[in-house]
Amino acid sequence: MKIGAETLDEAVTLLRLQLAARALTTAERRHETAVERVVPRRRFGKDPSVTPI
């Protein structure tokens, strides 16, 4: 089975788009998690930049 250059280029473009979408989703979720963690710490007067040991 032979694949033309145009088809191959389209496949690569779609794979890159899928990878970018997954990276964006991961970044959004990590941001949400960080905000969820910081908000309660601020509420109780703790400095969110200090990580408890």
Image (spheres, rainbow, N blue to C red):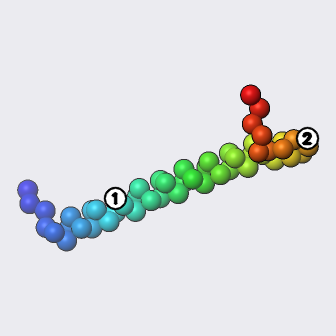
* x and y percentages locating residue 5 in the rendered image: 16, 69
The disc placed on residue 7 is none
- Type of amino acid at the residue the image marks with label 2: Phe
Mark 1 or mark 2: which is in front?
2
- Type of amino acid at the residue the image marks with label 1: Leu
Given residues 7 and 41, the one toward you in this image is 41
N-terminal label among 1 and 2: 1
Tell me the quadrant of the picture where the C terminus can be found.
top right
In contact (CB < 8 Å): disc 1 and disc 2: no
Identify the secondary structure beneath mark 2: loop
22, above or below 33, in the image: below
In the image, what residue occupies the spot 87% across and 41% down?
46
For marks 1 and 2, give the CA distance: 45 Å
Tell me the quadrant of the picture where the N terminus can be found.
bottom left
* x and y percentages locating residue 33 in the rendered image: 68, 45
Identify the secondary structure beneath mark 1: helix
Quarter-of-image position of residue 20: bottom left
In the image, what residue occupies the spot 62% across and 48% down?
30
31, above or below 51, in the image: below
Given residues 4 and 36, the one toward you in this image is 36
The disc placed on residue 15 is 1
Residue receiving disc 2: 44
In the image, what residue occupies the spot 32% across and 65% down?
13
